[in-house]
Amino acid sequence: MIEVLLFLMMKPGVESTAVGTVTFENPDYCAFTGSSVQFKCFYNYSDEETVRKTSWYKGEMKDGTMQRVSLSLIPSYQNRWIYRGDYQHNCSLELHDLQDTDTGYYFFRFDTNKYGWRSKGSLYLSVTELQATVSPQRVRVGNTVTLECKTTCQLPIVWLRDGHRVTKSQFRAQAEDAGNYSCSAEGPNPKQSHPVALDVWYPPINVSIEVSGGDMLTEGSSVNLTCNSVANPAADGYTWYRTAASSTSSLLQVGSGQVLTISPMEESHNGLYVCQAKNPVGQNNSTMVLVAVGEEGINRFIVLGIRVLGIIVMLLLPLAVVCAWRRSRRSTAEEERASNDYENITVTEFK
Ligand SMILES: *[C@@H]1O[C@H](CO)[C@@H](O)[C@H](O)[C@H]1NC(C)=O
Ligand SMILES: *[C@@H]1O[C@H](CO)[C@@H](O)[C@H](O)[C@H]1NC(C)=O
Ligand SMILES: *[C@@H]1O[C@H](CO)[C@@H](O)[C@H](O)[C@H]1NC(C)=O
Ligand SMILES: *[C@@H]1O[C@H](CO)[C@@H](O)[C@H](O)[C@H]1NC(C)=O
Ligand SMILES: *[C@@H]1O[C@H](CO)[C@@H](O)[C@H](O)[C@H]1NC(C)=O
Ligand SMILES: *[C@@H]1O[C@H](CO)[C@@H](O)[C@H](O)[C@H]1NC(C)=O
Ligand SMILES: *[C@@H]1O[C@H](CO)[C@@H](O)[C@H](O)[C@H]1NC(C)=O
């Protein structure tokens, strides 16, 4: 009876002096596949005890119950964990090259010369991928694109396009939005997702005509007109039009294909040329380009000019002669008057 009482009285005392505690500085870790993590951990025990053994456990489900299995007994952890703690109060653990299967509960246990102490609670590690999705990946200009970053970690995420910050995760696609997108988690272990390409389709722009052979076209020569444009996907259909110089209103279809070859060049080919470039998204036209047999035209202009000049000269010659005679008479009269003035002035000056 006395013995029992003694036992009951002593028990609380024994417990209060022998309190083993394990403290996880952070009970929740989130880390990315392939990265490393350090669990910060401290443990306490009574002064009379000396630590003999420490070990970390992973909680594994077996037959519907969670069982603690020492990391040293799990093959997949081999060479991937380092005990960064000591035999005093530090029980930190480092895990490297994290794998998806490392996700789960972790426990710490230490054995002193007197007792074995287990952490009451556990810490949870979540190993996650950082996965970028761009939907849709191929879009027509003006349509909406949504960026999504899949991860279970509650970490601040930023989006990058070809290494540059992107501020919006939803936008109407413009041609310049095309590129490789990845999401990135900042923090002590920065991580970037695999890139995902966004392709933006747009109709041809900057459609222009390139004329081979320079400005001077001679009759009978050959000339190539090339239709250049910027488009995604590249333009795959071309139509050529010409307006005859005489009638500016009607467009005449004169060919197809990126290069229009005019050979031999004749006066009847003179005109304003337009090319239309087409891709699966749409079509657009170049500005008009004047193509004309140059030298011939200039020659004709010169000949015409001389003829017109000749007629004018013939018609105006008699008139011109009369005018010239009258003007010469008037100018002599004016000369006289002018000299008089001069005389007067000089006279005045000498007075
Ligand atoms: C650990 O134990 C010491 C005394 O042994 C005590 O001073 C300290 O407050 C304890 N720390 C924790 C976290 O329990
Ligand atoms: C103790 O814990 C810290 C983390 O808080 C760690 O950096 C250190 O290496 C640990 N080990 C020793 C022996 O100090
Ligand atoms: C995107 O990545 C692919 C291959 O990974 C590369 O061929 C392409 O040039 C990249 N695009 C840009 C805009 O950097
Ligand atoms: C289209 O032409 C303009 C003006 O010449 C130029 O600034 C622009 O860069 C061109 N666009 C493309 C996609 O080449
Ligand atoms: C045609 O191209 C010009 C630039 O070259 C562009 O401003 C215009 O929007 C385009 N038109 C269409 C219908 O795509
Ligand atoms: C026009 O293009 C053809 C082939 O596409 C080439 O043989 C010819 O020399 C070119 N003519 C001129 C005037 O550039
Ligand atoms: C380009 O010209 C063709 C022929 O005149 C016309 O049918 C078409 O609408 C024009 N396209 C644009 C974008 O202006």
Image: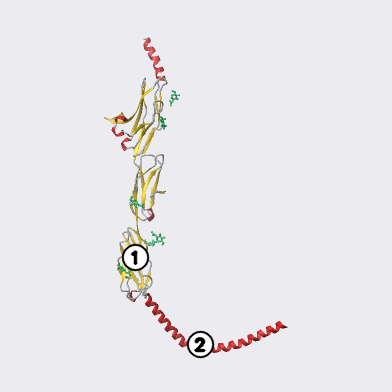
Q: Which element carries disc 2, helix, strand or loop?
A: helix
Amino acid carrying mark 1 in the image: Cys
In the picture provided, is 317 more to the left or to the right than 238?
right
Pointer 2 residue = 320
Q: Report how far apart the C-alphas of labels 1 and 2 lie in the structure.
A: 55 Å
Q: Nearer the viewer, residue 204 or 143?
A: 204
Image quadrant occupied by the C terminus:
bottom right
Residue 169, visible in the rendered structure: no
Which of the 4 image quadrants contains residue 301? bottom left
Measuring from the top left, give residue 46's x and y in whole percent.
41, 21
Q: Which mark is residue 227?
A: 1
Residue at x 36% of width, y 49% of height: 181
Residue type at mark 2? Ala
Seen in the picture, residue 304 relative to 288 is either above or below; the reply is below
Q: Residue furthest left?
A: 63
Q: Are marks 1 and 2 in contact (CB under 8 Å)?
A: no
Q: Kindly indicate the quadrant of the structure image that contains residue 335.
A: bottom right
Front-lying residue, 289 or 332: 332
Q: Secondary structure at mark 1?
A: strand
Q: Position of residue 150 (x, y in %)?
A: 35, 43
In which quadrant of this rendering is ligand 6 seen? bottom left
Report x, y in % for residue 97.
34, 37
44 in relation to 185, above or below:
above
| Total numbered labels placed on residues in the image | 2
Residue 332 rendering spot, x and y as whole percentages: 59, 88
Q: Is mark 1 within 8 Å of ligand 7?
A: no
Within 10 Å of disc 2 (Cα), the crowding (few <14, some 14-19, many 20+) is few
Image check: 167 left or right of 254?
Answer: right
Q: Is residue 3 visible?
A: yes
Q: Residue furthest right?
A: 351
Q: Residue at x 68, y 83 (%)?
A: 346
